[in-house]
Amino acid sequence: MPPRPRIGITTSLNDGEQRLDRRYVLAVERAGGLPLIVPMLESDEAAEAFAALLDGLVVTGGPAITDGMVGQLPPDIEETAAARLASDVRLLSSFFAARRPVLGICYGMQLGNALAGGTIYADVQAQYQEATAHSQKRGATNHAVLVEPDTHLGQLLGHDAFSVNTRHIQAIEETGNGFRVAARAPDGVVEAIESADGLFIGVQWHPERMDASMDALFRDLVQKAAMHPSSA
């Protein structure tokens, strides 16, 4: 049996503790990957050394992105802890430079877009005229997602429209260099982005919280990781 590709999973930071929803771990395991929880390291050298151990990366959900932000944060969302942000930036930058596969989820998608020079609404509901609520804290429920034609995301999920959960206040305004919109909500809000080569796929919803139909996102990451292994 071939070895499982090593998939790093980032974590949240709460009162000095790294925390991770186990559903991310189980999704990677089901997909055939070996889940490795990413420590929040403080030096570029250590972060690069850890990144070199990984074949693929999941950047999980989190608080607000401020790089490239348009507008002011509303009171119901906080900035990301500096230690987490610095760690995630080091890891993502290393993966981008090495051209290894990444699945960005919610904050993870937004951070990848910011590193590529994209912009983000501080509060999409207030700033984008057609936007409805996209946060459960504001009464939002599941909504449809419309996949753009001829995208990697469309090939993965096998259909043009489906229902997703919604847990975000911010949303992408403009995609960064090398990224394109892969899906939108019916109100026009960006719900997924991807790189032309498909090595970065970002989704605004939380697939780890959904049914088996979303396992394809994690299987794709693991399969690409097997094709782009680290040198470690």
Image (cartoon, helix red, strand yellow):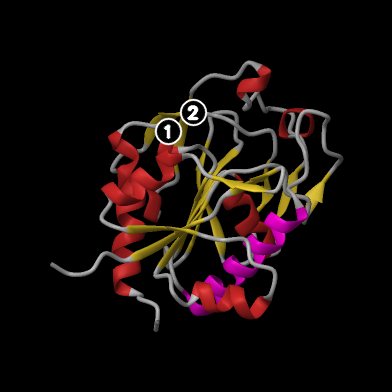
Image check: 136 left or right of 103?
right
Please report the residue visible at 31 percent of the width from the left and 66 percent of the height from the top.
5
Residue wearing tag 1: 209
Q: Quadrant of the C terminus?
A: bottom left
Q: Is residue 118 visible?
A: no
Please report the residue visible at 68 percent of the width from the left and 19 percent of the height from the top.
138
Which amino acid, mark 1?
A: Arg
Residue wearing tag 2: 165
| Between discs 2 and 1, the one toward the N terminus | 2
Which amino acid, mark 2?
A: Asn
Position of residue 51 relative to residue 27, above or below, is below
* Structural crowding at the residue carrying mark 1, measured as other residues with C-alpha within 10 Å and reported as few (<14), some (14–19) or many (≥20): some
Which sits in the foreground, 82 or 113?
A: 82
* Structural crowding at the residue carrying mark 2, measured as other residues with C-alpha within 10 Å and reported as few (<14), some (14–19) or many (≥20): many
Please report the residue visible at 48 percent of the width from the left and 37 percent of the height from the top.
206
- Tell whether label 1 touches label 2 (CB within 8 Å): yes
Instruction: Read off the magenta span.
Output: 82-99
Q: Position of residue 104 (x, y in %)?
A: 52, 53
Which sits in the foreground, 110 or 17?
A: 17
Position of residue 121 relative to residue 47, above or below, is above
